[in-house]
Image (tube, grey):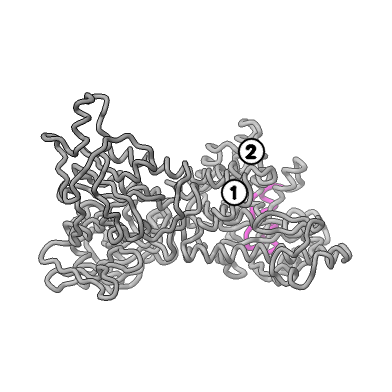
Amino acid sequence: MFEIKAKDGKARVGVLKTNHGDVKTPNLMPVIHPRKQTIDVGKYGADIVITNAYLIYKNEDLKEKALENGLHDLINFDGPVMTDSGSFQLSVYGDIEITNKEVIEFQEAIGTDIGTSLDIPTAPYVTREQAEGDMEITLERAREAISYVKDNDYDMMINSVVQGSTFLDLREKCAEELSKLDADLYPIGAVVPLMEQYQYKDVVDVVMHSMKHLPDDTARHLMGAGHPMVFALAVAMGCDLFDSAAYILYAEDDRFLTTRGTIKLENLNEMPCSCEVCCKYTPDDLRAMDKEERVNLIAQHNLHVSFAELRLIRQAIYEGSLMELVEERCRAHPLLLDALRCLGDYSDDIEVYEPRSKKSAFFYTGPESLKRAEVTRHLNKMRARKTKKNLVVLAGNRKPYSKFINKDYKKFYLYSLDEDNLTEEELSKFEDGIPEGFDLNIKDENTDYLVFDIPFCLIPLELDEVYPLSQNEAPKINDEIAVEFARDFLVEYAEKYDNVLIHPRIVDLCELDYIDLYVDPERIKVRKNDLEKIKSIADYQFGDGAGEALFTGKIEIEKSKKTGKIRHIFDKKQNIVNMRASDSLLILSKLGAKRLYSCSEGMKNKVMISNSVESFARDGKSVFSKFIVDCDENMRSNDEVLIVNEEDELLAFGKALIGAKEMNDFSVGQAIKTRKGFKK
């Protein structure tokens, strides 16, 4: 059983429950060799390990001990143990002396926690015929294994491995077929050759296409990924578990693992980290040791670095800052940077899992940040936004923009006027301002005021305090990729308007075509309107029409005496919503929930729960995933949601802890933290 505790995009901190204890994910399973293991990996942070059932089966002495005393006693590890079936040996030698059914029986007999069917790992870049044939055998054996485990009522969890080589449609097909089998974990196999060749971009394609068809309520295991420099990227793609013998294999070759790559002992002048080994010994000390002692110490360092990186990744997920860490780590190697850019092409897939608001600000670290899910979400919302007749594009300075907006309105450039259709005489009329008879009536009621800034391109002035449009940090940006990205969106968006005025600084930065135009500052004076602001925030947060539905009647707006920010909104002393100071999003009250419900057609903003737990919701109790019948497909974690019964009656309201896809997949864990219920 797998349960999510925190999430950031597709990454999640979870708990995998096994017969020998719970495992916090993401996590690494060090490979334990059943014959020659010398390091107690549990002592250095391992919560779960993996070993090879086939190697034990082939060795009569090991086989006898495992059957008599159990696997955990054999490898001297009392936590959860996963076993591989011998598929690695199959890929190396072409054949092995065990059947799929026999290896499943053996794994159960020796007491493994998580067994694996005998899949066929297909190398990259083989023929499609071979990849498809191997995949069909893998699927057939997965079906046989799961059926056998269930029919015999085995107490062992079971892996079903996604194969398909580098043929992305085969990866999707394999994942889709496996997801119908209700396995306990889904490893993604045969990526080690890609990583050994530094083909990280292909790894991203393989993993992301596999993930599209794997259920969210099950842990995903990236097989053979054991280098700490790739952990953050893999976790961002939704991987929960890793396994590798790299910690000991690299040590045997006198190589130190780091998050920036691998370092040979012969090239070390200083120890690479602050672990116990690196603090206690010098490179010269290690070089002077006998081989066995040195290997053990370097392996300890490698384990320390690996587990420290996973702790850092889990903390970043809690904070909502994982992608900043990913962007930092992927700059350690040019081909990892290629992989990061490839991941940006899956921004729409990741956005579905991206929380609506986070504890941390959005940090722009380079052009790769432009493809982050937060940017994709905002631009999609802007494309769907209702517009007015005129657009004024202002230059952003400090945040919030509405407080520090550039006041220099004496000169704006008129953009998107087709100069080819105007004579020189007509063009000359613009030199002294707007010519008589030319329709450019810039007033508040028919004009949108947007701030131009990177990375979010265009920000409506009334939304400038909403997460992450204000809660972001970027250096002064003048790189061509970022400017072109923002320019392209500005040009696309400006086509919606009859008239567009653009601040000179933006025209110069983006090299836009324009007509000189001097405008009376009073004609485009930005006027603050708190009611319009909260209506715009409601529409942005809940959808078009929410603002009008929520804020009717005698609206009173209460602001913080200390900051001047809006805090509470009332109708005749009755609280409608509160505005959260950290992200300026609206938090519903009972009245607000009722009003939002009145304008939410279909499943919009709603989670439908089973009638069997209606009374618990009305009492304000949390909603668990297993009782969810339906939900708004656009729901994201941290959204304000309405809770309804199967007859669409409003029962309660609260905050979503997971998004729509997870609500539809999960049958365990809390889905909604209920704020208040409506008693009958």
Label ID, residue 443: none
Q: Residue furthest front?
A: 432
Question: What is the secondary structure assignment of the residue under circle 2?
Answer: helix
Percent position of residue 413, x then y: 27, 40
Callout 1 amino acid? Ile
Give the residue displayed 10% in from the left and 66% down from the top: 554
Residue drawn at x 65%, y 58% is 259
**Quarter of the image holding residue 46?**
bottom right
Q: Residue at x 63, y 66 (%)?
A: 308
Nearer to us: label 2 or label 1: 1
> Residue at coordinates 80% horizontally, 64% vertically from top-left?
283
Write the start and end of the magenta stretch as one range.
99-117
Task: Provide the residue designation for mark 1.
Answer: 188
Say whether disc 2 or disc 1 marks the residue closer to the N-terminus. 2
Q: Does the magenta stretch include residue 103?
A: yes
The answer to whether residue 430 is magenta is no
Q: How crowded is mark 2: few (under 14 residues within 10 Å), some or many (20 or more)?
A: some
Give yes or no for contact between labels 2 and 1 (Cβ–Cβ under 8 Å): no
Q: What element carries label 1?
A: strand
Using the image as rendered, state which of residue 432 and residue 680 is in the foreground: 432
Give the class, few, some or many, for how many residues have Cα within 10 Å of label 1's Cα (few <14, many ≥20): many
> What residue would you read off at disc 2?
134
- Residue 675 makes an appearance in the image: yes
Q: Which quadrant would the C terminus be assigned to in this image? A: bottom left
In percent of width and height, residue 197 lies at: 69, 42
Instruction: Name the image quarter holding residue 510.
Output: top left
| Of 86 and 411, the residue lying toward us | 411
Q: Which amino acid does label 2 sit on?
A: Asp
Question: Which of 132 and 289 lies nearest the eye of the viewer?
Answer: 289
Q: Residue 337: where, in percent of width, then height?
A: 58, 47
Q: For the residues marked 2 and 1, what is the alpha-carbon distance in whole angstroms?
A: 14 Å
Residue 519, relative to residue 68: is it above or below? above
